[in-house]
Amino acid sequence: MKRTTRWGGLAVLLGAVVAVAAIAGATGGHAATDAKKPIVIGWAFDAKGQMAPFDDPALAAAKIRVKQINAKGGVTKRKLVIKTCDTQNNNPTTAKACAISLLGQGANIIFTTCDVDFATPVVQAAINRGVLAVAPCIGTDQMGPKRFAAKGKLAFSFGNVAQDEGSAMAQYAWSRGWKTAGLGTNTLLVYFKNVVQAFDKRFRQLGGKIVDRESYATGANNVNSAVTRLNSHKAAVYVTSTSFGELPAFVSGLRSLGNKTPIINSWAGDGTYWVTNNPKVTNYYFVTYASVFGDDPSAPVRSMIAALKAAGSPPSTGGFLGGADAIDGIVIAIKRAHGSTKGSALAAQLVKFKRVPVLGGRISFSAKLHTVFGRDYRVIEINNNKAKLKGLVRAKVIPKL
């Protein structure tokens, strides 16, 4: 009787062990299945509107980078998938609907357009659900708590923060022996204004003198008046941050007046698509993410440019790099978060970035600055409408504005 009881008890115990093992196996299988699910990046972008020249190259580079990462096994054994939605010239209603649609399709991370005003509906939709919101090339410090309050801890940009960019421009100007500067500020965008403000402050810290400060605005038809006033003040360099139609007007305006003084611009003035034939663009400089003119110092960057050309998306400016760098940065954050794609977990890793290597070089974030600083900017010079890499510059100080 005792033997039977013992064997019966053993049978019950073995059965329980088998049952537990079966449950554990089933649970483990489910977890394994979850682990194999792709990491979905929802990308709300402007396909054909005014932000398309910035959004399209960044997305094209990101797609290539994702393909390269997936070919090596993905991230923590999970593939990356990009799902897109056209915001149709960043119409606020459409942009918000895009974000909600992408979140409904399981987006773990939301990417948005390269201007913080246009990006706001998408960013808010993401961070209100605890999802990380990323821009490949917004250039202000507003992609974070400064604009979006506490929930802004989940918002980041892989663009260059304007304060860092303007500081790097000032440092380069000083290194060239340009001790006096005339400033022309395009008041259209916060980015434009902050770049010039940062140059102003850092240049004076270095010992430089500002001989004149003028302003103009895109669409206001007042750039020529600003140029005339700047021309009346002799300077070693003229400084601006602008693009659109005001860029050729600013440069050709000075040259038409016989003023051959160097002009330095931010990433906004990247490329040669805008150059004028009469007068030709000469003694013009700008800082940017990467040189698209075949002479970038980084072999991986040159390879990315070649891949973009092969894909039918040749970049006209270095802004494409923000898309690839953002993918790299997200991958690093996921790995450091032990595979988590939770917004707060990824944000906690991103703010710790200090000279972290991505495709374009090394980048940093901080609790205060959620937009990249510390980049090695490429300095490009255009002479007779031909662009050439002049060197690299990295800001040593980020001025407080």
Image (cartoon, grey):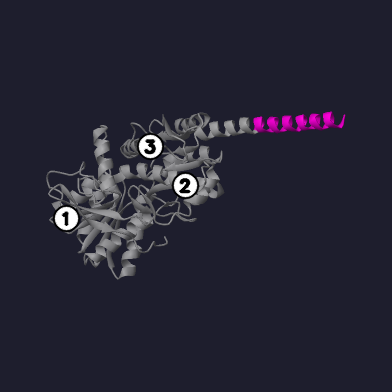
Instruction: Indicate yes or no whether the magenta region holds residue 224.
Output: no
Q: Which sits in the foreground, 269 or 75?
A: 75
Return the disc, 2 or 3, that comes first in the chain's sequence: 3
- Are there few (<14), some (14-19), or many (20+) residues within 10 Å of tag 2? many
- Are there few (<14), some (14-19), or many (20+) residues within 10 Å of tag 1? some
Residue picked out by circle 2:
333
* Amino acid at the residue labelled 2: Ala
Residue 226 shows up from this direction: no
Cα–Cα gap, marks 1 and 3: 38 Å
Query: What quarter of the picture does the C terminus occupy?
Result: bottom left
Return the disc, 1 or 3, that comes first in the chain's sequence: 3
* Most common SS among magenta residues: helix
Q: Are marks 1 and 2 in contact (CB under 8 Å)?
A: no
* Amino acid at the residue labelled 1: Asn
Query: Residue 313 is drawn in which quadrant?
Result: top left
- Secondary structure type for disc 2: helix
* Amino acid at the residue labelled 3: Val
Q: Position of residue 205 (x, y in %)?
A: 34, 69
Residue 203 higher or lower than 33, as above or below: below
Cα–Cα gap, marks 1 and 2: 41 Å
Residue picked out by circle 1:
283
Q: Which sits in the foreground, 387 or 192?
A: 387
- Secondary structure type for disc 1: loop
Residue picked out by circle 3:
66
- Secondary structure type for disc 3: helix
Q: Residue at x 65, y 30 (%)?
A: 22
Instruction: Indicate yes or no whether the magenta region holds residue 19.
Output: yes
Q: Is residue 4 left or right of residue 150?
A: right
Magenta stretch bounds:
1-23
